[in-house]
Image (cartoon, helix red, strand yellow):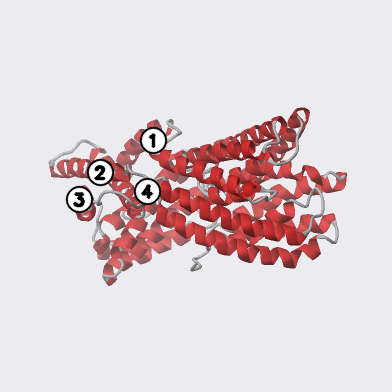
């Protein structure tokens, strides 16, 4: 329940969703067809995605999101037009939710992930349809999705390299925090893991960015963050933070004075070439996601069935609640269940306060929903429950786009569906265990040990081939990041064999020692005082 720091770019999705939702809704309001807003919202909410991607990659990702959102909506509308059985519709919704969860996790789509997709498709299942109406309802969704694509791409006109610069700055700041933790002798392991993840994410961002001088300059800075990660004792954290601060805006990328040429980036080019080949495989391995998909399908289906048995008119609320719970392991799923319940409870109170204002006129209803859209995206990065405080009344008010309803009944049904969805959804997470998480941890350990041995062997050679040592260092860093993520996920699962915790700690320690050895072998560390003296002389 603790509130964290807001995301560095919280205002980008918040403003984007306003710009994407407002024009379609206001047009429908003027035409007196606000009942179609449920379909335009499907396309407009695509503006929430891909804000951390470089614009070349963002164009592709947003296009796929729009197509995926429209495809899920099409399946839901077809099902709604062919049957009115709530049990059949819940089953379709559960299967859609499982497919959306698996695809979003496999492609690492990122926030808001599958929840928005599931919310739209599940709600559409219970909107009365005829087969002939389906194309006419998909058209507004696709048009709004095209508008959302333009909204997502528009900031690139002013800051064409903004995402890459932010990712690099984050890596530099995380590396500086690791250096500080190393010097203080407190919290070093956590800071090192965070810095390694930030550096790895920066490389992945640069991999999907357009080539050019700007990317080349950012690569040099990420190399400096890598060096700080490997050898914190020889790094000045203030310089890292200065470079991160200089990356704000559109000024030229700072060039570290101790990187005098591009020789050290030959290994970067080799690593990017390998990454580019693998990036064509857009989907990650689906087999490890099978337990998570099974949990989602089972939990959503049982939650929807339970809601139907209780006579709730909107079982998709319970279905979406269950779908929103599932995280990498049971421990995180439990945390999300608590956050979801608390956020929804406070959210229905907010709905009770706002509904008299929204009932003044349809224009007031649209404006209140826009404000809640902004609030949800502004707050959710601080904690999921806080964002749910805005999402819940917004979801309730959207049901009134077609007609005004009894607020008391809406509140009661939402509360019951929240509790049912959370309880049944978490029970499904307990029932469907991930028995292969230990195998994935063993594979990650083997990968770290293999890449460490390879890097150590190259570091021991008198004249390793150009770029091979740097590529090996980067491969080892990526393997260490994967090991930490896999170990964290495994630690939160239950009913499994004992985890090799000591082996994980040993592999991480030896891996980071080898990283430091490769840095020194490459001669990337300079005398800090000599660098300062050279800079003073130049001035």
Q: CA distance from mark 2 to mark 4?
A: 21 Å
Sooner in the amino-acid sequence: mark 4 or mark 3: 4
Q: CA distance from mark 3 to mark 1?
A: 32 Å
Q: Quadrant of the C terminus?
A: bottom left
| In-front residue for pair 63/216 | 63
Residue 284, percent from left and from top: 41, 36
Sooner in the amino-acid sequence: mark 2 or mark 4: 4
Question: Element at badge 3?
Answer: helix
Residue sitting at 71 percent across and 49 percent down? 21
Question: Element at badge 1?
Answer: helix
Q: Which residue is mark 3?
A: 514
Q: Which residue is mark 4?
A: 200
Question: Element at badge 4?
Answer: helix
Sooner in the amino-acid sequence: mark 3 or mark 2: 2
Q: CA distance from mark 4 to mark 3?
A: 17 Å
Sooner in the amino-acid sequence: mark 1 or mark 4: 4
Count how many numbered circles sit on residues in the image.
4
Q: Residues within 10 Å of mark 3 (few under 14, many from 20)?
A: many
Residue 396, percent from left and from top: 71, 55
Q: Which residue is mark 2?
A: 442
Q: Which residue is mark 1?
A: 287
Residue 255, percent from left and from top: 40, 53
Residue 154, percent from left and from top: 64, 45
Sooner in the amino-acid sequence: mark 3 or mark 1: 1
From the viewer's perspective, is the residue at label 3 or at label 2 nearer?
2
């Amino acid at each position: 329940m603790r509130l964290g720091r807001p995301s560095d770019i919280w205002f980008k999705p918040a403003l984007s969703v306003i710009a994407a939702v407002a024009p379609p809704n206001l047009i429908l309001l003027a035409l007196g067809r606000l009942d179609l807003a449920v379909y335009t919202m499907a396309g407009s909410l695509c503006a929430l995605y891909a804000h951390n991607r470089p614009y070349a990659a963002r164009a592709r990702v947003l296009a796929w999101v729009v197509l995926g959102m429209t495809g899920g909506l099409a399946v839901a509308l077809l099902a709604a037009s062919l049957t009115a059985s709530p049990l059949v519709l819940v089953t379709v919704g559960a299967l859609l939710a499982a497919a959306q969860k698996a695809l979003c996790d496999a492609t690492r789509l990122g926030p808001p992930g599958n929840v928005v997709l599931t919310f739209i498709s599940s709600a559409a299942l219970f909107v009365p349809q005829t087969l002939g109406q389906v194309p006419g309802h998909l058209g507004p969704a696709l048009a709004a999705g095209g508008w959302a694509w333009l909204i997502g791409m528009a900031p690139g006109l002013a800051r064409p390299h903004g995402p890459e610069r932010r990712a690099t700055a984050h890596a530099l700041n995380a590396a500086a925090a690791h250096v500080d933790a190393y010097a203080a002798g407190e919290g070093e392991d956590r800071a090192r893991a965070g810095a390694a993840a930030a550096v790895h994410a920066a490389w992945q961002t640069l991999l999907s960015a357009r080539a050019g001088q700007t990317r080349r300059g950012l690569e040099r800075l990420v190399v400096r963050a890598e060096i700080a990660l490997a050898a914190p004792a020889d790094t000045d954290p203030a310089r890292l933070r200065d470079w991160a601060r200089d990356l704000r805006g559109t000024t030229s990328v700072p060039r570290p004075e101790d990187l005098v040429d591009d020789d050290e980036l030959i290994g970067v080019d080799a690593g990017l070439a390998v990454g580019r080949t693998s990036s064509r495989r857009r989907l990650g391995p689906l087999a490890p996601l099978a337990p998570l998909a099974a949990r989602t399908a089972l939990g959503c289906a049982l939650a929807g069935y339970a809601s139907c048995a209780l006579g709730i008119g909107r079982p998709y609320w319970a279905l979406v609640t269950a779908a929103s719970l599932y995280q990498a392991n049971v421990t995180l799923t439990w945390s999300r269940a608590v956050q979801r319940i608390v956020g929804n409870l406070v959210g229905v109170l907010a709905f009770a306060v706002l509904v008299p204002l929204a009932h003044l006129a349809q224009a007031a209803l649209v404006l209140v929903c826009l404000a809640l859209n902004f609030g949800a995206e502004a707050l959710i990065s601080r904690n999921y429950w806080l964002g749910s405080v805005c999402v819940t009344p917004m979801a309730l008010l959207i049901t009134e786009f077609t007609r005004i309803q009894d607020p008391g009944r809406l509140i009661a049904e939402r509360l019951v569906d929240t509790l049912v969805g959370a309880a049944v959804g978490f029970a499904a997470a307990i029932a469907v265990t991930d028995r292969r998480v230990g195998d994935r941890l063993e594979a990650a350990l083997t990968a770290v040990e293999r890449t460490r041995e390879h890097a150590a062997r190259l570091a021991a050679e008198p004249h390793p081939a150009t770029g091979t040592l740097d590529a090996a260092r980067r491969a080892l860093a990526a393997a260490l990041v994967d090991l930490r993520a896999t170990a964290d996920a495994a630690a939160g699962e239950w009913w499994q064999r004992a985890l090799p915790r000591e082996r994980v700690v040993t592999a991480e320690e030896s891996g980071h020692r080898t990283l430091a050895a490769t840095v020194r072998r490459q001669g990337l560390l300079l005398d800090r005082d000599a660098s300062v003296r050279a800079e003073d002389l130049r001035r």
